[in-house]
Image (tube, rainbow, N blue to C red):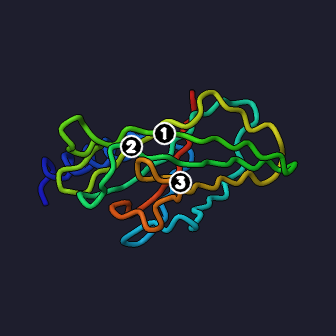
């Protein structure tokens, strides 16, 4: 490999590894071919700096088998003192023409869905996040048993600094 190619390779590596400086935590869990309504995806968060503020996101990978225009989630944040904050969230997942929103060049799209901004983790100990879907068909009370088209669910924390 000549010097020019080596330099290009080093610069490319630096660029790729420096693009995501805000990332503090970013993890995905597979839900298989469909997400069962009783299946809870959970994440234990690392110890975070109690003097900093963080933004949090739910990440979802979905494909063309996803049949709904929106996604309802129930997200719980359990603090070390066992206090639990529960949010029911709705996200738009498609354009008006039915094409999936999100990033990706194939039929698999990745969506970074906003959850909370400027959060502090000021208690010592383990924080835990749980996520389950709450999608229902229009006019029906019972939730969708097996939500097809969602393949992975993730959680991401970014530093505000």
Position of 64 relative to 38 (above/below): above
Q: Residue furthest bottom?
A: 32
The residue that appears at 57% across and 62% down in the rendered structure is 41
Residue identified by numbered label 2: 70
Disc 3 and disc 1 in contact, CB within 8 angstroms: no
Q: Distance between the residues labelled 3 and 1?
A: 17 Å
Residue identified by numbered label 1: 90
Whichever of labels 1 and 2 marks the residue nearer the N terminus, that label is 2
Q: How crowded is mark 1: few (under 14 residues within 10 Å), some or many (20 or more)?
A: some
Disc 1 and disc 2 in contact, CB within 8 angstroms: yes
**Quarter of the image where the C terminus is located:** top right
Residue 141, label in figure: 3
Nearer-the-camera pick, 64 or 8? 64
Whichever of labels 3 and 1 marks the residue nearer the N terminus, that label is 1
Q: Is residue 41 left or right of residue 152?
A: right
The residue that appears at 84% across and 51% down in the rendered structure is 82
Q: Distance between the residues labelled 3 and 2?
A: 17 Å
């Amino acid at each position: 490999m000549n010097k020019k190619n080596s330099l290009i390779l080093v610069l490319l590596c630096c660029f790729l590894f420096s693009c995501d400086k805000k990332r503090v935590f970013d993890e995905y869990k597979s839900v298989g071919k469909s997400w069962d309504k009783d299946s809870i995806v959970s994440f234990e968060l690392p110890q975070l700096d109690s003097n900093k503020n963080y933004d949090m996101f739910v990440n979802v990978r979905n494909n063309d088998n996803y049949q709904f225009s929106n996604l309802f989630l129930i997200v719980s944040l359990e603090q070390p003192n066992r206090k639990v904050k529960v949010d029911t969230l709705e996200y738009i997942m498609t354009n008006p023409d039915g094409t999936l929103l999100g990033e990706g060049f194939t039929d698999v799209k990745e969506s970074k869905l906003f959850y909370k901004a400027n959060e502090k983790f000021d208690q010592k100990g383990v924080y835990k996040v749980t996520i389950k879907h709450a999608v229902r068909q229009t006019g029906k009370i019972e939730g969708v048993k097996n939500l097809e088209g969602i393949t992975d669910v993730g959680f991401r924390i970014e530093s505000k600094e």
